[in-house]
Amino acid sequence: MKIAMVSTPFISVPPEKYGGTELVVYELVEGLAANGHDVTLFATGGASTAAELRFLYREPQWPPCPLTELNHVSWAVSEILADGTFDIVHVHSAFALTALRTFPGLPLVYTVHHAREEEFSDFYRYFPDAYFIAISANQKRLEVPFPRCDVIHHGLDPRRYEWSAEPGDHVCFLARFARIKGPHVAIDAAEKAGVPIQLAGETHPSEREFAEKEVVPRLEHPRVAHVGCLDHRGKVALLQSSRALLAPIDWEEPFGLFLIEAMLCGCPPVAFPRGSVPEIVEPGVTGFVVETADEMAEAIRPGGVVDSFDRERCRERAAERFSRSRFVSDHERTYAKVQANRAGKMVHPEIEGV
């Protein structure tokens, strides 16, 4: 297939540090190219990719701005339409859906990367002919009904994540310092368990007030270390060396790449049962699901369940369920369905992913 992949203009592909959507785009593009597809990536200059790269902006445009995104997406769509030979147009921005008004036959696939937001949900109602991809069954369940929607869990290349059988004595937290991510709860649980914790992440401007009140004072505690915002290598090293990843999330997390990154390093997530967690974490096999901070502390205390955890089996199971190859195969099936529907074949409009 000849595939156009439209990323965001905000973060490079792959991201140097933070960037969930852009990491997913990277894994998908590289996997599709490896499978012999002709892929063109519309991203920012400097992207590292086996695909053909086209860009409007030479550098990532951070912080995000709707006008910048609109400029990037409208340019990409114009390039795609001028080419006229793409079998699939896979977009990661809602702005691209508007192209279906002018070109209703465009073979457009859109991945929803965010938790439900009413302004987006209202917008999606106007595009019933689009093919949507939800990244978890829970995300899809909470959204407006999509007439055509596949659930495809994210996948990563296991070769980029090495596991370790011998972690250090600390646990870790890996996310931005936002209330919904629970860094303050993670610190409190670690302190209650009497174990050190290392936190990797940063504060976004919209969350600064929360971080200054709830996180910064806790970073001064003796067994708490802030290791900054890590690149890929630093992230893997942190997960390899940690007894567990703490994920006391307080929102409907659409997926949570950091969970499967931890699993691929043999590091068990200990997570609250919100969002996609019940779909992703297999209790006792790839991590633990707990209801409260007290239960989290009990799991990670010295001699607790994480100390008898089979890190090798965790890595193996994560590679089975969340590999790049599975991720790409799921998308190939969706793309084939889009093409079949365009050709007027009778195909059931809704196929659930794994």
Image: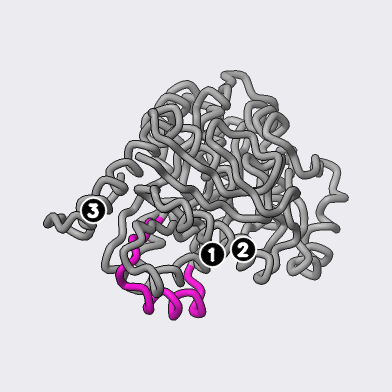
The C terminus lies in quadrant: top left
Kindly identify which residue carries mark 1.
251
310 to 197, vertically: above or below: above
Quick one: SS at disc 2? helix
Q: Position of residue 115 (x, y in %)?
A: 50, 65
The outermost residue toward the left is 346
> Looking at numbered disc 2 in the image, what kind of residue is underneath it?
Ile
Q: In the displayed structure, does residue 347 sit left or right of residue 167?
A: left
Any magenta on residue 131? Answer: yes
Residue occupying the point 34% across, 53% down: 151
Kindly check if marks 3 and 1 are in contact, taking CB atoms under 8 A apart as contact.
no
- The answer for how far apart the CA atoms under marks 1 and 2 are is 6 Å
Label 3, residues with CA under 10 Å away: few <14, some 14-19, many ≥20? some
The outermost residue toward the top is 165
190 to 346, vertically: above or below: above
* Range covered by the magenta-colored residues: 116-134
Q: Position of residue 291 (x, y in %)?
A: 49, 56
Q: Nearer the viewer, residue 185 or 212?
A: 212
Q: Position of residue 96 (x, y in %)?
A: 49, 65
- Can see residue 274? no
Q: Which circle, 3 or 2, is nearer the viewer?
A: 3
Quick one: SS at disc 3? loop
Which image quadrant is residue 234 in?
top right
Kindly check if marks 1 and 2 are in contact, taking CB atoms under 8 A apart as contact.
yes
Q: Nearer the viewer, residue 140 or 29?
A: 29
- Can see residue 255? yes
Kindly identify which residue carries mark 2.
180
Kindly identify which residue carries mark 3.
351
